[in-house]
Amino acid sequence: MSRLHDTIEPSVVNEEMLQKAIVEQGPQGPAGRIAKEEGIEFDEVTQLRLEFLNILKIDHLWQFTALTKLQLDNNIIEKIEGLDSLVSLVWLDLSFNNIEKIEGLDKLVNLQDLSLFNNRISVIENIETLLSLQILSIGNNFISELDNVLYLRRFKDLRTLNLAGNPLCKEENYKIFIAAYLPDLVYLDYRLLDEKTREAAFAKYQYAIEEKKHNEAQEQKAKDEKKKIEEELQLHKDAFVEYLNGSYLFESMFADDAEATKLAHLPGVPTLLESFKNQLVNLCTQLFEAGLAQHWRRHNEVDTFFSCYREAVIDNQDRAAKLGAEFEIVRRQRVNEMHQMADSVMLDGLVDQHNEEISQLYEGLMTMELQLVDQLEDIIKDFERNISDMIAAFLEHVQGIFAQCRDLENHHHEKLLEIAVATLERIAKNEMEEDMPDEVRMLFVDKDTVTNAVSASHDNHLLKIDNREDAFVTRINTWLSALMKTIHANEGSRNRKRISEILNYADYVREQIEILLSNEQPLINGQ
């Protein structure tokens, strides 16, 4: 059922293997020679065959981001790995290998056709993200549990399934079980599922299917609710205001405050706490709403920047492409003239003329790039100034609200201290009628003890407010710093890449002239 290492040395996918495969499978003839001279970029390859190569380990495929079809069949692969970057993949063949577990496919969300035929797999699992799957071939494996097929109900587009050669195929109700639980399936084990089979499946499993659908609907509802909560929380985190739309800050201030818990037993304190909570929650709500509003303004500002940036780049590319197209017309004309030129002196003059045209193209393209760099630098500076001013104004507003939170805590502290001192005086005069737990009475042995307890609670509350403010300010400044760093880095990378393209193109054109001359020179000398 699986291939052995045989006598051939096991191999790992490496750069040499990939280059060889691309050349062999790429265009042939003149087109192939041009492609080989110019070099084929891995991120431009759309199809790749790496079959019958005794491959043990998948590696070095991270650059093939445009790949839509990959054949890795008939090797000795034991583990599915190294495929995360192949996000464009539609067709994947891993048949006839030694794979024991389905894994490492969760990033291939565009996959439609997957073959794991003839491996050592015993469980269908870990492909729940492949919701575009239409064809699954997993025959000749070790799948024995019929219930494992229920995993495939999530794939609403699955139309073709091959399980032939697995132990579960020997189950008495194998065919009608699958027809019942996968009602949209068209082909099973290379054969069309006929109407008679579907009717038998419905008759036998009708009530089980209804119960299954009900349970799935409940599970989906719970998942949708959980997803909604997670998405909402992520939005709040992106706005730096998570858990500020409620009493979380208030509760966190009192969560680890043993002294506050004891003081809450004093007469009048519950009412004081309720008033404090309501006012603090109101301030937190202001922070929350201001943060969300600021988030969308920030989001729009960023979108506007990238839109302006892209427009500038595209306009520059269009003008450069036009210049390049005009040059190509001239270049083809010069090449034809050189082919027909028999006089070496005139040919040299023609070459000099064309080299001057190449230099003019180079200077023109480089001038355009320098102009674009200046333009983008202005766009980036304007954006950085605008977003920085926006965040500075927002932080000023936020810090003002946090200052109000501290004022509120100070007021609460003063009122609590008044109640505590008054309670101490009543206890000293034996006028205390309300019952208090012993641990609370222990605070009232003297004024210093009760004052220290109230002050410790106050310090703890201020620390929680300060920490939340510090986290807010630090995170938004970190976000801005990271954003600008990424923008500058990406622009630097774009500029270097563009300059390299211009240099390489100019060098390529000159090299083509040299090759042409070396081929033509013997003919001229002969004449």
Image (cartoon, rainbow, N blue to C red):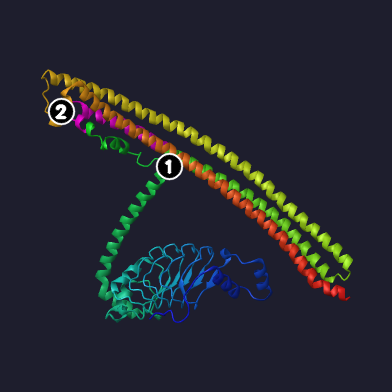
Circle nearer the viewer, 1 or 2? 2
Which residue is located at x 66 percent, y 57 percent?
Answer: 501
Query: Which is more toward the observer, 334 or 157?
Result: 334
Q: Magenta: predominant secondary structure element?
A: helix
Residue 69 located within the stretch drawn in magenta: no
Say left or right for 464 vs 297: left
Say left or right for 190 vs 380: left
Q: Which residue corresponds to mark 2?
A: 442
Residue 449: x, y in percent?
21, 25
Q: Quadrant of residue 526?
A: bottom right
Residue 140: x, y in percent?
37, 79
Which residue is located at x 59 percent, y 42 percent?
Answer: 380
Disc 2 is placed on an element classified as helix
* Above or below 368: residue 283: above
Q: Which residue corresponds to mark 1?
A: 239
Identity, as a three-letter code, of the amino acid under mark 1: Ala
Spatial separation of the CA atoms under disc 1 and disc 2: 45 Å
